[in-house]
Image (cartoon, helix red, strand yellow):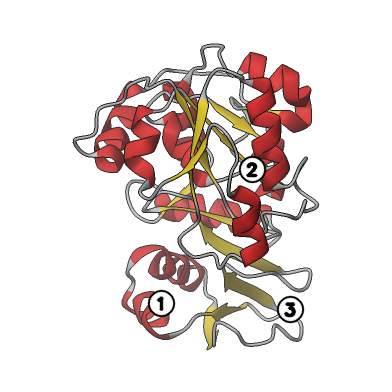
Amino acid sequence: MERILNFYLDGDKRARAEAGIGIFGAVVGVVRAAGWQVRYAGHAAEVAGEGYHLVYNRAVAGSFCFSLRRCYLEKFYRIEATNDRWDWAVAGLPFQGGERQAWFQRYWRARLFGGLTAARGGYIFMPLQGKLLQRRHFQTASPVEMIQATLAADPERRIVATLHPREVYSEAELDALRGIERFELVQGSLPVLAGCDYVVTENSSMALTGFFADKPAVLFARIDFHHIAASVGRLGVAGAFEAVHRPQPYASYLHWFFKRQALASSGDGHEAQIADRLRAHGWPL
């Protein structure tokens, strides 16, 4: 195949790629340094024909089409054979601990939480996502079933929940939340996260954010950051709610997950990281 990167970007992202800015510019710089050409198409354009294709945060199509997607924090990304986070390569890797590297957790805790103080307020934080009445293939229960299972597993604490700001909820979904005892809907996630005892969610990134404040998490769905969470899929409901109270190496895990497993858009060695990742996918750089 011709050594041409077909890059599916619109507007500002394409401009950043051509200007050598951020992750888009870094990818273009890596392939051009290896003698490749770059051909652009719109973000929503159909992936067709042979060749090497890179889409941004959308489903892949074909053997040499990969997804570039942000890895939760600013300046961290992944290039994967699927856009589904729960099937990313890191999800299948064992986390075996490592150096504590507390600086990374401290730095991002300050960036994410600002002046908020982490405390234990006697409640569970539950960031809800979409399709509250439906159990999807990567979930062990629907979100409404998750609420009921949580209340049964922890009869002492109340649930303080938020709705996803970009989801549109039906009246049937909202009706299902009304009148649930020990359940309250609020707005504003970070203050609630900072004050909770632990997080329960399907696979919201708020659980990963909570790791920066040493907040344990129960997950009812598959996701890439499951390693130190109490996973209902692995442990069952009772096992997960028992395991959530065990200490976890948050600082070590966060350094491993981001600094060792993700791609940086800048910094020492970031071009080599990107090149190695593309080679691992079979691209001849």
Which kind of residue does numbered mark 1 sit on?
A: Lys
* The label number, if any, that marks residue 247 in the structure image: none
Q: Residue at label 3? A: 1
Pick whichever, 268 or 218, lies toward us: 218
Residue 70, compared with residue 147, is above or below; it is: below
Residue at far front of view: 179
Which residue is pictured at 72% across the width and 37% down the height? Answer: 92
Residue 171 horizontal/vertical position (percent): 62, 65
Q: Nearer the viewer, mark 3 or mark 1?
A: 1
Q: CA distance from mark 1 to mark 2?
A: 31 Å
Residue 175 horizontal/vertical position (percent): 62, 56
Which residue is pictured at 41% across the width and 64% down the height? Answer: 26
Pick whichever, 130 or 177, lies toward us: 177
Q: Nearer the viewer, mark 3 or mark 2?
A: 2
Q: Secondary structure at mark 2?
A: loop
Q: Are marks 3 and 1 in contact (CB under 8 Å)?
A: no
Residue 31, compared with residue 262, is above or below; it is: below
Along the horizontal axis of the image, is 14 left or right of 54? left
Q: Residue at label 2? A: 202
Along the horizontal axis of the image, is 222 left or right of 11? right
Residue 221, compared with residue 53, is above or below; it is: above
Q: Nearer the viewer, mark 1 or mark 2?
A: 2
Taking the image as drawn, is residue 220 in sight?
Answer: no
Q: CA distance from mark 3 to mark 2?
A: 41 Å
Q: Residue at label 1? A: 13
Residue at far left of view: 115
Q: Secondary structure at mark 3?
A: loop
